[in-house]
Image: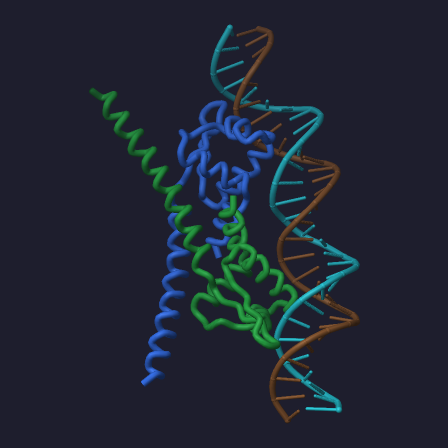
Chain colours: A green, B blue, C brown, D cyan
Amino acid sequence: MAVAEIFRALGDPVRLEMVQRLSSGAPCTISTVSNQLGITRQGARKHLQVLADASIVTMRPKGRDVFVELDRSSLDQAEQFIRELERRWDQRLTALKSLLEDNER
Amino acid sequence: MAVAEIFRALGDPVRLEMVQRLSSGAPCTISTVSNQLGITRQGARKHLQVLADASIVTMRPKGRDVFVELDRSSLDQAEQFIRELERRWDQRLTALKSLLEDNER
DNA sequence: TTCATAAGCAACCTCCAAGTTGCATTATAT
DNA sequence: ATATAATGCAACTTGGAGGTTGCTTATGAA
């Protein structure tokens, strides 16, 4: 289940903070990210790799730097997944409800 | 960040499977869940506790059994969070685009 | 009443993830 | 040309997560 990887990547406070900052701010380098969060560059790098593996983020090297940028597609995927869950759940509830109404007759 | 807990809970293949089954099927007991997934009851119980802590699932004891049921609210919360991320990101991109157009003049 | 079934509690094992430090490498600015 | 800044790679430590087994408790059915 690929979507589990996306949720897993988002399920860490540090990475979620990264994603939030990236959603508002401009694309920035790995060092910038690590400075903002107050953790080691290597630590930040690992987190960013997790996000990249889940396609939540893309990293393009440019000269000496590596620029990190948000990628909408997996966010979309996660959103769609949740909506589908909710759809099924609602469907079940309404089915249950109409069943009860039938029994009242 | 409470939403991180929700994502974390969803970020495990076993738990995601649980949630999917619960979204389609009827509320069922802990033993039923563990049987469906082929893991120990105690193993399943731990996973369900994680889901319950994230308010993705509610567990109500009834006599000898404990019935597990999906709870829409945190799913909603997660969905809203992602939408907000996407909104901000899109906003940034359009702002960037109009900036470029201005420079062309 | 007796037996089987659903669950709780606790201890335990194993492995991975988060984070660090240290060193090597490459590119930029002076 | 040289120093500095950004990164990569590797090894290491540690806490917690996923999963199990064993035993006890309580409820429902025969």
Q: Residue at x 51, y 30 (%)?
A: B33
Image position, residue A2 (x, y; %): 51, 47
Q: Examine the rendering and report whether any part of residue A35 can be seen.
A: no
Going by the picture, which residue comes out furthest to the left? Answer: A105
Q: Residue at x 46, y 38 (%)?
A: B19
Q: Residue A24: which quarter of the image?
A: bottom left
Which residue is more in the foreground, C30 or B71? C30
Q: Residue B82: which quarter of the image?
A: bottom left
Image position, residue C29 (x, y; %): 61, 89
Q: Residue A59: which quarter of the image?
A: bottom right
Q: Image height check: is B70 above or below A11?
A: above
Q: How many marks?
A: 0
Q: Image height check: is B47 above or below A59?
A: above
Which quadrant, please, contains the C terminus of chain A?
top left
Which residue is more in the foreground, D17 or C6? D17
Q: Residue at x 39, y 70 (%)?
A: B93
Which residue is more in the foreground, A55 or D12? A55
Q: Is residue D30 left or right of residue B99?
A: right
Q: Examine the rendering and report whether any part of residue B95 can be seen.
A: yes
Q: Is residue D23 left or right of residue A95?
A: right
Image position, residue A6 (x, y; %): 51, 52
Image position, residue A53 (x, y; %): 56, 56
